[in-house]
């Protein structure tokens, strides 16, 4: 299994299990099965609404001797309604309580967008805090305090542009060590990968399979399918692989970590086996040619220009 080694020597497996969209009643079994298969990297978030069930899976896995806590890498994320400096530590405290852990390995700012405390998802511009009311620098200072207090070993960001990361790097005590973003052959973001490699920031790919099961409000009915793409199908057939295995291995082989989601035992094993596959240089070049700069998670739900949030300011593109 490929791993990323952090500055303090901690190791994060390149392949992890994503838990976004894993429903209550399913995620417990998915995590338990994943740990039995050999997964040691589990990606969580408060917003996913399933951390208590994942916590029960952790406890049972520890108690059964399936895995030791020190051998597991757990990531979680700060939701947008807890960006005020005084709300960050309590939010992480709730995540730790839900996951039944004393610490997490990595805590990320989920989005560079702030909502008012108590607002889970915005219904109007009134639900947002302006950039001035909740500056990222203040949120990051509170994230740093979580490291100093031993609540998280590492901190990072998610859905941050190069511009936003540079601003953090210029005004931080603890550097962000991970940026988790949408990455797949239709949206490869090579500039971000080059930047993160230069800054010693691990890039993690979410929605690496195109997230076809995400909620309809987050989808374009005309968006292309990675699974049905002729190039991906050709490479899969030629190598005796499933399309998902090609997509996962492509992500790992280009130097990113990847967190595909599944609750199906067969696909969990199939996805895990992707870590041992090797694609040829020819296959990698064919996949590179699929770049379409096609973002599937557009972030349109954060559009509140009067408060400083728009598609242009979100992605800085």
Image (cartoon, rainbow, N blue to C red):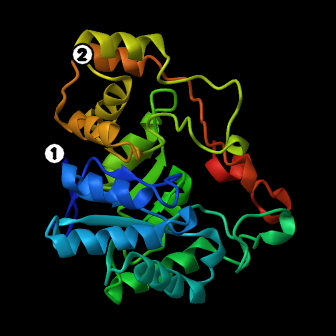
Q: Is residue 96 left or right of residue 153?
A: right
- Residue extending farthest to the front is 25
Q: Position of residue 19 (x, y in %)?
A: 44, 55
Residue hosting label 1? 1
Disc 2 secondary structure class: loop
Q: Which mark identifies residue 240? A: 2
Q: Is residue 175 visible?
A: no
Q: Marks 2 and 1, how far apart in space?
A: 20 Å
Q: Nearer the viewer, mark 2 or mark 1?
A: 2
Q: Is residue 113 left or right of residue 287?
A: right
Q: Image quadrant of residue 122? A: bottom right
Q: Position of residue 305 (x, y in %)?
A: 82, 56
Q: Is residue 280 visible?
A: yes
Above-or-below relation of 233 to 210: above
Q: Position of residue 68 (x, y in %)?
A: 16, 71
Q: Position of residue 114 (x, y in %)?
A: 68, 70
Above-or-below relation of 238 to 228: above
């Amino acid at each position: 299994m490929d791993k990323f080694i952090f500055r303090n020597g901690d190791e994060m497996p390149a392949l992890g299990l994503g838990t976004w969209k894993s429903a209550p009643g399913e995620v417990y079994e998915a995590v338990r099965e994943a740990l039995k298969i050999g997964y040691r990297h589990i990606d969580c978030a408060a917003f996913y609404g399933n951390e208590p069930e994942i916590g029960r899976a952790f406890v049972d896995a520890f108690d059964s001797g399936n895995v030791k806590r020190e051998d597991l890498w757990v990531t979680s994320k700060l939701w947008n309604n807890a960006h005020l400096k005084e709300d960050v530590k309590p939010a992480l405290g709730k995540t730790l309580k839900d996951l039944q852990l004393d610490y997490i390995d990595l805590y990320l700012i989920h989005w560079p967008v702030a909502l008012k405390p108590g607002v889970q998802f915005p219904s109007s511009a009134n639900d947002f805090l302006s950039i001035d009311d909740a500056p990222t620098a203040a949120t990051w200072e509170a994230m740093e305090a979580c490291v100093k207090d031993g609540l998280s070993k590492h901190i990072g960001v998610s859905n941050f542009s190069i511009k936003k990361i540079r601003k953090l790097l210029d005004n931080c005590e603890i550097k962000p060590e991970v940026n988790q973003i949408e990455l797949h052959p239709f949206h490869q973001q090579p500039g971000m990968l080059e930047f993160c490699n230069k800054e010693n920031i691990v890039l993690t790919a979410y929605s690496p399979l195109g997230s076809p099961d995400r909620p309809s409000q987050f989808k374009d009915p005309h968006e292309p399918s990675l699974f049905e793409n002729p190039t991906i199908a050709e490479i899969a057939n030629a190598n005796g692989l499933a399309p998902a295995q090609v997509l996962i291995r492509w992500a790992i082989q280009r130097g990113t970590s990847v967190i595909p989601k599944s609750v199906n035992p067969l696909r969990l094993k199939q996805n895990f086996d992707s870590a041992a596959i090797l694609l040829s240089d020819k296959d990698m070049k064919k996949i590179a040619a699929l770049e379409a700069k096609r973002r599937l998670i557009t972030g349109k739900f954060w559009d509140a220009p009067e408060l400083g949030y728009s598609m242009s300011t979100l992605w800085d593109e």
